[in-house]
Image (cartoon, rainbow, N blue to C red):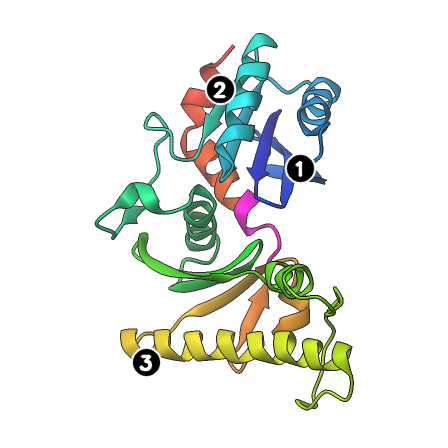
Amino acid sequence: MILLLDIGNTSTKSACYNLKKNKILKISSYLTKDKNLIPKIINECKKNKITKIMTTSVVPKIYNFLKKTVIKKKIKIFEFKDKNILKDIKINLAKKNQVGSDRLTNAYGALNYYKKNCIIVDFGTTTTFDIADFRNIYQGGVIAPGISLSLTALNQFTAKLPLIKITKQKKVIGKDTKSAINSGVFLGYACLINGILNKIFHQTKKKYLIILTGGYSNLFKSVIDFKSIVNQQITLYGLAKVVKQNKRLFSEIR
């Protein structure tokens, strides 16, 4: 059994992957800042008899500490960007090392699962838009502040604005502080998302499958002007595909 691990700035998602049956099982989620994150991952490895880990990480400090820990436990660990990991995806960027491992994994998962031009909108700590060409080319993307980040900033950098949980809102004019913040964030991000998607379509003159993933996917799906689908496991699909593509490497590890 192989552990798939997506280490994000806010949350870390794990899943057991049966390479022989090509099945993703037992999906779990943890807070990345949890002091017991590494022990929990080690416990998960022990419980499920994990000997190999395939990960994507945007938090080098956590990944490096995890790597040192699991090696002592005789568990092999790989990261999506490792040079010895084969990936049939081209990166159409001048500075290829700057693109986040998670964004490449999302694109890789989307291309291999849907086999179409894709735009992956990921509602994480940041809100990202990643453009993937059906010919297995990562074309680049857009990074905007995340929704939770914006809500926290409004609360922490002002004297009186409360920290709210956003909900769907149709009326743009708020009648109190909470509804005004909700309008600004919910409707503001709806305009941001639709505006960026519209520009991508206009500038590339291509058709895309829009895939929403991350915490706010279902909330925003209804206000997106373009047809879209929600897939919360797209990163895990990308990791699983990498393992499958490197089947010989993973199966030979003892």
Q: Which residue is mark 2?
A: 251
- Would you identify the image quadrant in which residue 150 lies? bottom right
Please tell me which residue is depicted at 67% across the width and 37% down the height of the picture. 33
> Which residue type carries mark 3?
His
Query: With 86 as the anchor, is 166 left or right in this view?
Result: right
Q: Position of residue 208 (x, y in %)?
A: 40, 70
Q: Secondary structure at mark 3?
A: helix
Which mark, by number, is residue 202?
Answer: 3
Residue mark closest to the camera, 1 vs 2: 1
Calculate the distance from the C-alpha at mark 1 to the C-alpha at mark 2.
32 Å
Which mark, by number, is residue 122?
Answer: none
Q: Position of residue 75 (x, y in %)?
A: 57, 15
**Which of 202/161 is in front?**
161
Q: Which residues are magenta?
A: 231-236
Residue mark closest to the camera, 3 vs 2: 3
Q: Which residue is mark 1?
A: 33
